[in-house]
Amino acid sequence: MTRRILVVDDSILVREVARAVLGASGWTIDVAAGGEEATGLAAAQAPDAILLDVELDGIDGPETLRRLRADERTRDIPVAFLTARDGDEDRRELEALGAVGVIAKPVSPVTFASHVAATFGWAV
Amino acid sequence: MSTPADGEADPALAAIRAIWADRRDEVIARVDVIEEAITNALMGDLGDDLRSRAAHEAHRLAGSAGTFGFETASAYAREIELGLKAVVMPATDELQRLAELVVGLRHDLESDQESGPLAKASPTPLVPNGHVDILGVAIDPRRGRRLATETAARGLVAVFAVDAEDAHQALSSTPRAGGDGGEVAGHARACRGESTHHRPRRTRSGGQSRGRAPGRTRIARLPEHDRRDR
């Protein structure tokens, strides 16, 4: 099954790597550089999942998630955070916001796709 | 799942290498901002704006460098980010530690040419060089900043000058023994007619960084018009 993932990160490098690596797994990858763009794309394209950086220029990841949850078009899209803040307490805080999981940055190209699949409960 | 060793046969890893080749210079250029911030901090002259920008660049480098397989650079960038985001400006010995990390960060990123970023293995350790004086004359401002950071990281004495006359003046005015970074910075500023009201913090009592005597680092900085030439 072809999945559609929206990757939200202010680093073009991370966006490009995500597109290359996750795209090679057969998934369709959309990218956004910030929270405003992400909420618009999510509403328009209804991705199967969103990978959301925590520290973003403009509105940050947690605020972006709050806006996604407040919009009936996007409230049910599973969201996982991408963050270097991956300690137990950080994870609990982020998951308490409604994220399904946290993927630690830096992501490894070798294991990125399997982490994404595991986080969203998809078969690889 | 593939491994770095068989990356050439993996289209995703081939794509990663292509992205790195395309973005390498851009990534490494981010280190410049961090270098400038640490150098200024060692001179007691780091403003909030540059500090914030450098912390942001360190944050981004921590993520992007790791994504390309530069695990050491990523870890260094992360530590630098935390240091720059500290509520209280790090003390001199802590800044020297950050300067070491900047050197290591750049070194790790620039040592990718032989085997490619995803094939990198162990980090290359920094080797302390001991007591060496460095004189840079007619030096490119960017190289000067880099050298300033490297010399600070290694506890060396460095004087940078834009021409021979400036070098002579700096050498004749810069003490060669004793005194901490602040005192030498004051000399350097005095040589160039700059303000001396910004001074680096004194090294904390008993706080040494990797076995070096605190306060040995001395940097004569580049003139302002060159330091802005980026």
Image (cartoon, grey):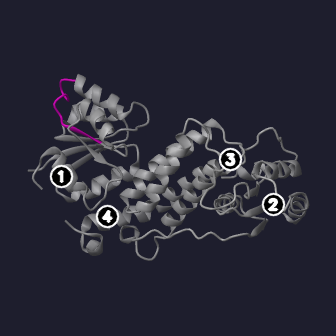
Chain for numbered disc 3: B
Residue under pointer 3: B205
Residue drawn at the location 55% of the way across and 57% of the way down: B101
Image location (x, y in percent) of residue B76: 49, 56
| Tally of numbered discs | 4
Q: Are marks 2 and 4 in contact (CB under 8 Å)?
A: no
Q: Earlier in the sequence, mark 3 or mark 4?
A: 4
Q: Residue furthest front?
A: B206
Q: Which residues are magenta?
A: A71-81
- Distance in Å between CA atoms under marks 3 and 4: 51 Å
The residue to which callout 2 is attached is B162
Q: Is residue B116 left or right of residue B173?
A: left
Structural distance between the alpha carbons of marks 2 and 3:
35 Å
Judge whether residue A7 is colored magenta. Answer: no
Q: Marks 2 and 1: same chain? A: no
Question: Looking at the image, can residue B57 be seen?
Answer: no
Q: Give the prevailing secondary structure in the magenta stretch.
A: loop
Q: Amino acid at mark 2?
A: Val
Q: Quadrant of residue B87?
A: top right
* Amino acid identity at mark 3: Ser
Q: Which residue is mark 4?
A: B15
Name the residue: 29% across, 39% down.
Answer: A91
Subunit ID for the residue under disc 2: B
Dot 1 alpha-carbon crowd within 10 angstroms: few under 14, some 14 to 19, many 20 or more: some
Cβ–Cβ below 8 Å for labels 3 and 1?
no
Residue found 77% across the figure and 48% down from its top: B182
